[in-house]
Image: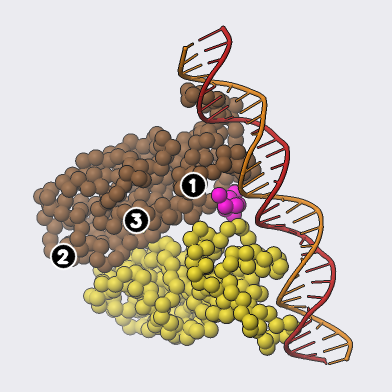
Chain colours: A brown, B yellow, C orange, D red
Amino acid sequence: MDQISNFNDRQYLNHISVDCVVFGFHDNQLKVLLLRMKFTKEWALPGGFVKEDESFETAATRVLKERTGLDSIFLKQFKVFSDPQRSKTNPAVQDLIDSGAKPDQEWFDQRFISVGYYALVDFSKADPQPDNFSDLCAWKSLNEINTLILDHLQILNKALENLRMQLNYQPIGYNLLPEKFTMPELQKLYETILGKELDRRNFQRKMLSYNILNRLEERKTGGAHKAPFLYEFNLENYQKALQNGLYGGW
Amino acid sequence: MDQISNFNDRQYLNHISVDCVVFGFHDNQLKVLLLRMKFTKEWALPGGFVKEDESFETAATRVLKERTGLDSIFLKQFKVFSDPQRSKTNPAVQDLIDSGAKPDQEWFDQRFISVGYYALVDFSKADPQPDNFSDLCAWKSLNEINTLILDHLQILNKALENLRMQLNYQPIGYNLLPEKFTMPELQKLYETILGKELDRRNFQRKMLSYNILNRLEERKTGGAHKAPFLYEFNLENYQKALQNGLYGGW
DNA sequence: TATCATTGTGTCAATTAAACACATTAACTT
DNA sequence: AAGTTAATGTGTTTAATTGACACAATGATA
């Protein structure tokens, strides 16, 4: 969200915010981290204003540290949202007023600019925390998300589009999965992002052909049926392969 | 460039600029439109401040209309540059002072943010025009470009990287070539962007397999040797094909 | 009219992708 | 404790695509 705190705090560029689309993977589903506004109960993307002396990346990192407890999150800037009209009917502003804040007129008249980042996190390691303007921070599956404040749904969709396009160029698997994972899990991740089903055997053959995975001795037990092997990324080869993009369409 | 005009003109957001990497294709080479600064004679990307009531896209469109005379230019936002330090040693500021301008201290202390766009234009239709701070506007081949003011070389390289990555997802051929073009011309464009040579016959086979080209009856005469056919894009199929990306690596 | 360099078209082998079969095995049932 | 179940591991076969080349056709030039 466009965090409205500190609107009279001079250390912030109080019209430039970062909005983060935080992706996680759980229960074979792609999840997004959202905040529920205290007063309007609408959902919003985590975000916040940029400080005067920090880069946008730093601002996004700072915000996400607060929302998830995680350091060194994978971040990718994907678009700036700057429609001059986007601030005119800002539900977050209403929420702010409901909360008793009293920004001056000049603050209302300014233009809000938001830099969109998508973030990839290990679902199991994140600890969702609401901010000053929200009462809940939670993971939502994509199909659960119908409306968001402002243009946040548009931002989310743009992030998804970028995620899909960059699947062969960014370490998406590495950042969304735990260190050890099974081939079916990796496949489900790909299927979810691409929005289509893939042949199990062809997927495995192709994935292994990239030489970016190490198969471990361990297997994942606990689930019913045959226990699948665990894999980890071979980071060196992975990085190298991503330089040219993982060849071939899915 | 970060245009420094209007620094005391309240209709401009005088710390947010758009910088445009304008690509054209000529003599089988990828060209970029650059400005030469009046006083320092350094080269810079065309750009300008954003007006308070216009979107970034509109600002970029406005600037490019001034620099090229062209309307409805293909534009793609690719990154925001916001390092808090980037304004500290700003050659453009020196140029401004040399020119006799006297911005106040507050203006110097602010932070410069630049939104990067790449633009694709039909080289033959552009009419390069310098702005108030430059004495020359000209096309430069990539290998001629060694240094640019500020972080413009970094911006240019980032644009190129994006152009390469999006070659299969954006109407790059359509926007860089004239309406009618030959297969060898299209191939050279691809080779230039990708930075490698391709097999003539395989390229043609693959390109035709997409069904995005109409072969015309005409041939291109005038050059020595056998006259190649002229092609045009089948816009409907082209757009459709780009949705999923032109399949296959090059 | 012969030459030249480039274009139009086609072939073949090697590689890759798509579709599918069968044996293996961890947990659950009874 | 043995049988059942459903998912996993590991192929094979066929079709499609790619990569590497060969050769004829042709527009300008000499």
Whether residues under marks 3 and 2 lie with C-beta atoms below 8 angstroms apart, the answer is no
- Please give the name of the residue rendered at 12% of the width and 61% of the height, measured from the top-left corner: A104
Of labels 1 and 3, earlier in sequence is 3
**Are labels 3 and 2 assigned to the same chain?**
yes
Residue marked by disc 2: A106
- Chain under label 3? A
Q: Amino acid at mark 2?
A: Glu
- Chain under label 2? A
Is A82 located above or below residue A171 in the figure? below
Q: Where in the figure is residue B79, as x and y percent of width and height?
A: 42, 62
Q: Where in the figure is residue A147, as x and y percent of width and height?
A: 27, 51
Question: Gap in Å between the C-alphas at discs 1 and 2?
Answer: 49 Å
Q: Which is more toward the observer, B21 or B133? A: B21
Q: Amino acid at mark 3?
A: Ile
The part of the chain drawn in magenta is A240-250
Whether residues under marks 1 and 3 lie with C-beta atoms below 8 angstroms apart, the answer is no
Q: Nearer the viewer, mark 1 or mark 2?
A: 1
- Chain under label 1? A
Tag 2 secondary structure: helix
- Please give the name of the residue rendered at 50% of the width and 50% of the height, measured from the top-left corner: A167
Residue marked by disc 1: A196
Whether residues under marks 1 and 2 lie with C-beta atoms below 8 angstroms apart, the answer is no
Of labels 3 and 2, earlier in sequence is 2
Q: Say which mark, if any, is on residue A155.
A: 3
Tag 3 secondary structure: helix
